[in-house]
Amino acid sequence: MITVEAAHARLEKKPSGRYRSLDGLRGIAALVVAICHTLLIQPGLMNAYALPASIEPGTLHWWLSFTPLHLGWAGSEMVYIFFVLSGFVLTVPFMKKPPARKWIIYYPKRLIRLYVPVWGAVAFSVLLMTIFPRTFSPTDSPALVFQLSRLNMDQLINELLLWPTPGFSNNVLWTLKLEVMFSLLLPLVVIFSMVAPKLNLLKAVLLFVPVFVFSTGGPDIKFFLPMFALGSIMA
């Protein structure tokens, strides 16, 4: 049986306090997500991704979806890994005695780290939309049609604030919205993680009840926030 101390030793921290193994896992996950978004431009693969039950066995799309080849573009699963990792790395500093981080420092630092890249991404998206106007055809992949074709001022402000909106000019921003939401709730999750440490397994099971009850497959906070909280319990 591996003890907690042995598990931490295996993770092998960098001098900066970061976990080297988790950095590698995060890099692999980011690459797979990028490949997934690239492949979903193809209508057939998008249909295979969104409606796997409609795929005919033995076809190329079947092989890419129902064999280990799927690991190369398993975007949704890699996003789940990102969420669990976020919960873990955000909680670890507060598990030390005394905590390696204070809440008054954590909030501004975390929000700046999240929002500055978002603002850059939105600015870049608006620039591209201005230079290359978006036009969509019914035969295009749903992944393309889902994108906003134009951006008004209200929508722009909502995107810059990561406020809940029907859509985004950059459709990966929904994950950052959840990152912000979890980051603001982190004190409550840390308290939940620290209460009754011997019941961590039970707490982990309880966290996943909303996942099964509200498993709509969409960016629903009831579906995804338990994944962040699971990372906190692991920490």
Image (cartoon, rainbow, N blue to C red):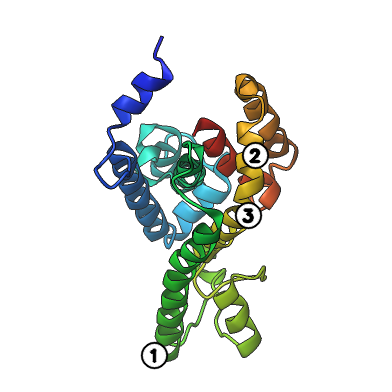
Q: Residues within 10 Å of mark 1 (few under 14, many from 20)?
A: few
Drawn side of residue 3 relative to residue 224, left or right: left
Q: Residue at x 37, y 60 (%)?
A: 38
Q: Amino acid at mark 2?
A: Ile
Query: Which residue corresponds to mark 1?
Result: 131
On screen, 66 above or below 80? above
Sequence-first tag of 2 and 1: 1
Q: Residues within 10 Å of mark 2 (few under 14, many from 20)?
A: few
Farthest residue to the left: give it: 15
On screen, 64 above or below 152? above
Farthest residue to the top: give it: 1
* Discs 2/1, front: 2
Residue 219: mark in rendering: 3
Residue 232: mark in rendering: none
Drawn side of residue 21 relative to residue 108, left or right: left
How far apart marks 3 and 1 lie (CA) works out to 30 Å
Return the x and y of residue 106 as percentages of the image width and height: 50, 57
Q: Residue at x 43, y 74 (%)?
A: 121
